[in-house]
């Protein structure tokens, strides 16, 4: 019988049934398409064996005038400058105590050190460095105390705990997933308090590594439910005043230090627990108003320890006490260069400045800090959603910023965030923000939407995305400096990192669509649309991150699947061939090649990876596969007999032991499980004078339709499929 060529349509299609997708592909992992044919993805390897603390939520590469290459990397715990293979901690300092404000106490036989510091302002996992301490008298020496520590527990507003360790830097004990230390255990001689000269230097508070939703309209997913709610009551024996920082409740079970509770319309941060007392409480938390509360008022858990509590109303459900509780966002970093210095911003937080001149041994500082020595400060923003530098005209731009200071001489903004306000500094001056007749500072306000989600600089303009619209911001020059125009409404954007600029186009993921902007907004037809959007964990959609891979004309989006709280899957659009493919890979940030010759990505295991290198998963074998839709003979009117397969493979200059499995499966009806299956390994035997491999194999399979699956599981294997041929013979109707 004549051989049948198996020439497949390129791309993955999950929008139809497998039977209707005849001669097409319906599923894959670690496979891309080039020139219409599938091939295994290239591999990846660690860019350095050093780990960082936390999950990376923003990267930025830049080069100093001297030619030194740097990478800014921010997590919920730290901000680093990567220099060579090392991560240098440049996390800003929020507070330094006076000498003697900090004292210590230890317990015989324990490594736990209790630290007393009035108004320390810490939450669990914050970092503090002690200096000037004297020995406690035994094992807890001055050297043990005078180093950086991570706060392990908040006792109350004046007290917290750390775990004593041998003398070592945090960087030296940073491993994948956290800090690995050798504990120091106090003995009976450790009775001192560290002396009267101890200074505590506190880094900016740690952020969240997950989004936490509040209550109220739009706070949860459609049809969400409230489960596991924790409720107790105020048990003061009288009215709870608005200034009380110790709150007596009926039962503290399930509440721990650093939790946030809700009483009526007030959010309260719990400092510590003592019997049935909530101690060291911060009243009027998250912008709510401290108020009096009647005895017996309901006390509900707004956020739980380690973010495990689930006490949030879903969309359309009744509100808790008729309030709308603010949501807490995960920490996302944006960065840009001002010359060879670095501007950085934690989303909905402060703007910082790292001066390269002082090297990686110095920390970033608040942009409002006079110690930067950048000149006279005027109304410098104290909060922003995102920061960038307009490359063409050299203005620092803060999106979702606070307003001007109360007077023209004010050094800082007014501290009240406007989520639709755009402010820009005077040209070439990152600290002059108050508009005058002699500078180019100013502001704009977007009129549609409720908040700015992302701003993205392109070759011609800055695109500004709100939750419902997209705007173009362009430099006009004096006297207006910038203008802004509405481009499109009724669009969505999935996250603060879901849009990416590629050449003259911008691609982004919305809440249920993919979009492109090439002068006008257009929806991109997507053959895996339902598969992707039905599978996203919408409570963690802020983690979605995009990245270009221009070497292959691709845009990647990494997202958390429905059963995951972290990015574990990807969807890719090849904008040159206009096709889609999917797979599984855990990445939290991505940078395309540029300063580095390879794309760079951050894993969920606290390491950075060079992508598109080799054929392995960081030295381990990488499984890849692709599976076709159902194929039939004579429209499935009769059974077919598959007798022989002639493969067409290119093993892409990999080792002569490379192999690839051909898996054929047959069935009689579309809704039936596969009845018969055969797996045959195609093995490479030589690379000269051409690729030589298993030239054919015989099989005996019978059915009305069949599928082809290609799969490789060995290390150091790369492959590309051509047009295999099969010997298919009619085999009757029954």
Image (spheres, rainbow, N blue to C red):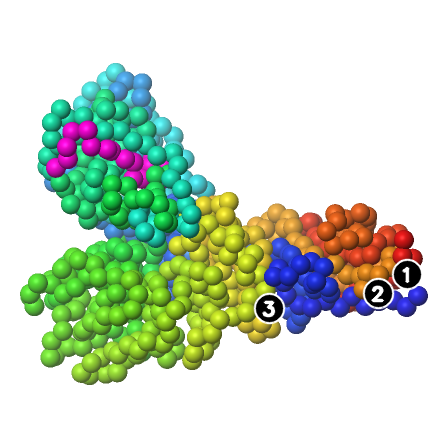
Drawn side of residue 255 relative to residue 180, left or right: left
475 lies left or right of 221: left
Disc 2 + disc 3, Cβ < 8 Å: no
Residue at numbered disc 3: 579
Q: Nearer the viewer, mark 3 or mark 1?
A: 1
The residue wearing badge 2 is 634
Q: Secondary structure at mark 3?
A: strand
Q: Residue at x 20, y 43 (%)?
A: 265
Tell me which segment is drawn in magenta.
Answer: 292-309
Secondary element under disc 2, as helix, strand or loop, is helix
Q: Is residue 52 visible?
A: no
Q: Earlier in the sequence, mark 3 or mark 1?
A: 3
State the residue in front, 576 or 629: 629
Circle 1: element type: strand
Residue 253 lies within the magenta run:
no
Task: Using a 10 Å C-alpha cutoff, classify the residue at mark 1 as few (fewer than 14 neighbours), some (14 to 19) or many (20 or more).
Answer: some
Q: CA distance from mark 2 to mark 1?
A: 9 Å
Horizontally, residue 272 falls left or right of residue 618, namely left
Q: Residue 730 — which label?
A: 1
Instruction: Name the image quarter holding the N terminus.
Output: bottom right
Counting residues from the start of the chain, the first of labels 2 and 1 encountered is 2
Provide residue 417's location: percent of width, then percent of height: 21, 59
Answer yes or no: do the residues labelled 2 and 1 have beta carbons within 8 Å? yes
Q: Quadrant of residue 658?
A: bottom right
User: Residue, x 42% and y 54% (percent of image)?
Assistant: 541
Residue 211: x, y in percent? 36, 48
């Amino acid at each position: 019988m004549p051989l049948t060529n198996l020439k497949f349509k390129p791309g993955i299609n999950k929008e139809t049934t497998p039977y209707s997708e005849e001669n097409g592909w319906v599923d894959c992992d670690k496979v891309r398409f080039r020139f219409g044919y599938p091939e295994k993805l290239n591999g990846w390897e660690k860019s350095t064996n050093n780990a960082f603390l936390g999950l990376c939520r923003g990267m930025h590469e830049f080069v100093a005038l001297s030619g030194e290459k740097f990478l800014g990397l921010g997590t919920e715990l730290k901000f680093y400058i990567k220099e060579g293979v090392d991560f240098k901690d440049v996390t800003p300092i929020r507070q330094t105590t006076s000498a003697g404000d900090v004292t210590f106490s230890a317990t015989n036989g324990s490594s736990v050190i209790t630290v007393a510091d009035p108004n320390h302002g810490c939450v669990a996992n914050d970092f503090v460095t002690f200096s000037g301490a004297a020995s406690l008298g035994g094992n807890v020496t001055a050297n043990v105390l005078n180093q950086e520590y991570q706060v392990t527990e908040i006792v109350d507003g004046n007290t917290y705990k750390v775990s004593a360790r041998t003398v070592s830097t945090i960087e030296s004990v940073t491993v994948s997933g956290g800090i690995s230390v050798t504990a120091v255990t106090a003995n009976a001689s450790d009775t001192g308090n560290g002396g009267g000269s101890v200074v505590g230097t506190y880094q900016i508070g740690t952020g969240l590594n997950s989004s936490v939703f509040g209550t109220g309209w739009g706070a949860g997913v459609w049809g969400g439910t409230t489960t596991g709610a924790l409720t107790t009551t105020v048990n003061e024996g009288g009215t709870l005043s608005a200034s009380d920082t110790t709150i007596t409740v009926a039962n503290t079970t399930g509440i721990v230090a650093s939790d946030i509770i809700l009483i009526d319309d007030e959010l309260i941060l719990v400092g510590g627990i003592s019997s049935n007392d909530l101690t060291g409480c911060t009243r009027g938390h998250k912008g709510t108003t401290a108020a009096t509360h009647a005895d017996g008022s309901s006390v509900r858990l707004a956020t739980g320890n380690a973010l495990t509590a689930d006490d949030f109303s879903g969309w359309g459900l009744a509100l808790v006490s008729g309030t709308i509780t603010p949501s807490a966002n995960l920490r996302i970093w944006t960065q840009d260069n001002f010359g060879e210095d670095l501007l950085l911003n934690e989303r909905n937080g402060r703007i910082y400045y790292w001066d390269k001149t002082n090297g990686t041994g110095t920390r970033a500082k608040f942009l409002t800090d006079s110690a930067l020595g950048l000149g006279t400060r005027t109304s410098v923003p104290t909060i922003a959603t995102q920061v960038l530098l307009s490359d063409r005209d050299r203005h620092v731009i803060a999106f979702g910023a606070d307003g001007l200071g109360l007077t023209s001489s004010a050094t800082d903004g007014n501290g009240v965030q406007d989520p639709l306000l755009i402010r820009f500094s005077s040209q070439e001056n990152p600290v002059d923000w108050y508009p005058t007749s002699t500078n180019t500072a100013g502001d704009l306000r977007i009129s549609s939407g409720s908040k700015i989600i992302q701003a993205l600089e392109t070759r011609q303009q800055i695109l500004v995305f709100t939750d419902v619209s997209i705007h173009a911001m362009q430099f006009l020059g004096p006297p207006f400096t910038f203008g802004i125009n509405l481009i499109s409404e009724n669009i969505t954007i999935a996250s603060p990192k879901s849009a990416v600029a590629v050449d003259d186009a911008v691609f982004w993921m919305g809440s249920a669509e993919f979009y492109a902007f090439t002068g006008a907004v257009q929806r991109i037809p997507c053959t895996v649309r339902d598969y992707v959007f039905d599978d996203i964990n919408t409570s963690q959609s802020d983690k979605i991150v995009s990245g270009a891979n221009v070497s292959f004309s691709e845009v990647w989006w990494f997202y958390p699947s429905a059963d995951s709280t972290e990015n574990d899957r990807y969807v890719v659009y090849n904008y040159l061939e206009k096709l889609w493919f999917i797979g599984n890979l855990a990445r939290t940030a991505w940078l395309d090649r540029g300063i580095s010759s390879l794309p760079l990505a951050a894993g969920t295991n606290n390491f950075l990876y060079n992508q598109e290198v080799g054929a392995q998963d960081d030295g381990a074998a990488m499984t890849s596969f692709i599976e076709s839709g159902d194929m039939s003979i004579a429209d499935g009117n009769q059974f077919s007999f598959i007798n022989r397969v002639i493969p067409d493979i290119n093993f892409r200059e990999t080792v002569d032991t490379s192999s690839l499995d051909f898996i054929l499966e047959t069935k009689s009806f579309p809704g039936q499980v596969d009845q018969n299956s055969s797996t045959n390994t195609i093995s490479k035997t030589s690379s000269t004078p051409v690729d030589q491999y298993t030239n054919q194999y015989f099989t005996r399979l019978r059915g009305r339709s069949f599928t082809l699956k290609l799969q490789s599981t060995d290390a150091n294997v790369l492959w590309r499929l051509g047009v295999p041929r099969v010997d298919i013979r009619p085999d009757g109707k029954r």
